[in-house]
Image (spheres, helix red, strand yellow):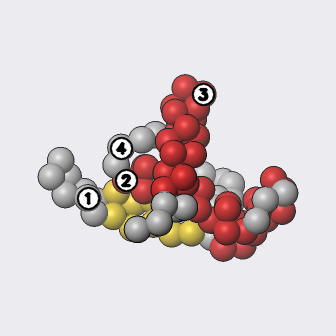
């Protein structure tokens, strides 16, 4: 999917397709469970923790955050951390 739609010759954990506009949040997020499991093993964290990060990452792409250079990646990681904290908020 990564190669077909984005011309990237690598495996990925998530692909986000943003179909939204200025006034509408709309899109599709595809998550590779196998890739998330492999990442969790590599980073020695739980599958659930890695899945939270990947889910946050996809939503952040849909609202306009990028990760093409070092600065964008740093901002993205900070925003992922903030979003992940919300998973622990009791409603």
Q: Earlier in the sequence, mark 1 or mark 4?
A: 1
Q: CA distance from mark 2 to mark 1?
A: 7 Å
Image quadrant in which the C terminus is located: bottom left
Q: Earlier in the sequence, mark 3 or mark 4?
A: 4
Q: CA distance from mark 1 to mark 4?
A: 10 Å
Q: Residues within 10 Å of mark 1 (few under 14, many from 20)?
A: few
Secondary structure state at the residue bearing disc 3? helix
90 vs 23, nearest the viewer? 90
Q: Is residue 12 left or right of residue 1?
A: right
| Outermost residue to the top | 71
Secondary structure state at the residue bearing disc 2? helix
At which x and y percent is residue 26? 28, 63
Q: Identify the residue at horizontal 60%, vertical 52% (top origin).
A: 8
Instruction: For the residues labelled 2 and 1, say whether their Cβ atoms are less than 8 Å apart.
Output: yes
Q: Earlier in the sequence, mark 3 or mark 1?
A: 1
Give the residue at mark 3. 70
13 vs 49, nearest the viewer? 49
């Amino acid at each position: 999917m990564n190669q077909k739609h984005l011309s990237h010759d690598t495996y990925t954990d998530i692909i986000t397709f943003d179909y939204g506009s200025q006034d509408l949040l709309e899109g599709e997020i595809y998550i590779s469970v196998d890739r998330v499991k492999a990442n969790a093993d590599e980073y020695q964290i739980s599958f659930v923790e890695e899945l939270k990060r990947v889910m946050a990452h996809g939503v952040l792409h849909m609202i306009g955050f990028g990760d093409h250079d070092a600065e964008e990646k740093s901002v993205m990681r900070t925003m992922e951390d903030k979003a992940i904290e919300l998973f622990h908020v009791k409603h």
